[in-house]
């Protein structure tokens, strides 16, 4: 908004702007919770994946979606913070009481945004660690099954040895 428009606003209008920012913050929180639920749903699907290839493919999509969601959320928070700073600058010129209230609210929003950002990053790290552990466990399981098959079927082991010596692909 232009400085002239903000100067012409009375206290009620400024409070309405602050209220609108609070509603936007609430909407962003709800969106964040929805994204968390979607991420949890994808983790359940990942745990049910039948092979390492499926798990790796699912992980790629999960991490891309999580990164995109986090980027969008941070962009939205940055825009909200910019709007709050503009309102606070004009409110300082208009009334000291409005300035005090607006500064307190802006600090709360910023602290909450930083805490949410920290939590989201920690959740992403934990999800990545879980996914890596799951993939490693699946790989070890597949390797163990291959060893069992090779021990059970010596002719298969001999065939694979010959193929590897001749440079052929399996």
Image: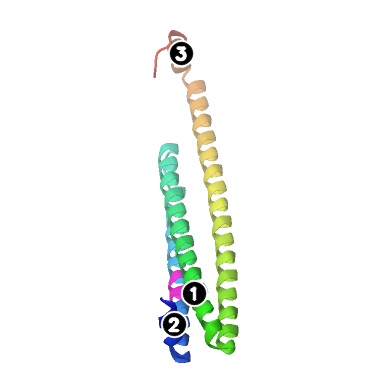
Does 124 appear in magenta? no
Q: Quadrant of the C terminus?
A: top left
Count residues near mark 3 (Cα–Cα under 10 Å), then give few for <14, some for 14-19, many for 20+.
few
Q: CA distance from mark 2 to mark 3?
A: 77 Å
Q: Residue at x 55, y 87 (%)?
A: 98
Mark closest to the chain's N terminus, 1 or 2:
2
Picture quarter containing residue 166? top left
Q: Position of residue 135 (x, y in %)?
A: 51, 40
What range is drawn magenta here? 24-28
Is residue 60 in view? Answer: yes
Indicate how the structure is coloured in the image.
rainbow
Count residues near mark 1 (Cα–Cα under 10 Å), then give few for <14, some for 14-19, many for 20+.
some
Comparing labels 1 and 3, the label whose residue is closer to the camera: 1
Q: CA distance from mark 1 to mark 3?
A: 69 Å
Q: Residue at x 51, y 35 (%)?
A: 139
SS under mark 1: helix
Q: Which residue is mark 2?
A: 6
Q: Which mark is residue 152?
A: none
Q: Residue at x 46, y 20 (%)?
A: 153
Q: Which mark is residue 164?
A: 3
Tell which residue pokes out farthest to the front in this image: 4
């Amino acid at each position: 908004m232009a400085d002239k428009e903000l100067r012409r606003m009375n206290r009620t209008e400024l409070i309405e702007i602050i209220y609108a920012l609070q509603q936007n913050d609430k909407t962003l929180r709800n969106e964040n919770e929805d994204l968390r639920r979607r991420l949890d749903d994808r983790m359940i699907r990942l745990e049910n994946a039948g092979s390492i290839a499926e798990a790796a493919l699912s992980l790629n999509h999960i991490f891309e979606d999580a990164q995109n969601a986090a980027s969008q959320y941070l962009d939205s928070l940055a825009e909200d913070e910019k709007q709050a700073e503009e309102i606070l600058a004009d409110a300082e010129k208009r009334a000291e009481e409005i300035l005090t209230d607006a500064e307190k609210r802006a600090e709360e929003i910023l602290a909450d945004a930083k805490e949410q950002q920290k939590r989201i990053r920690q959740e992403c790290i934990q999800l990545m660690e879980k996914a890596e552990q799951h993939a490693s466990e699946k790989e070890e399981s597949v390797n163990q099954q291959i060893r069992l098959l090779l021990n059970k079927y010596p002719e298969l082991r001999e065939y694979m040895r010959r193929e590897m010596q001749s440079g052929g692909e399996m």
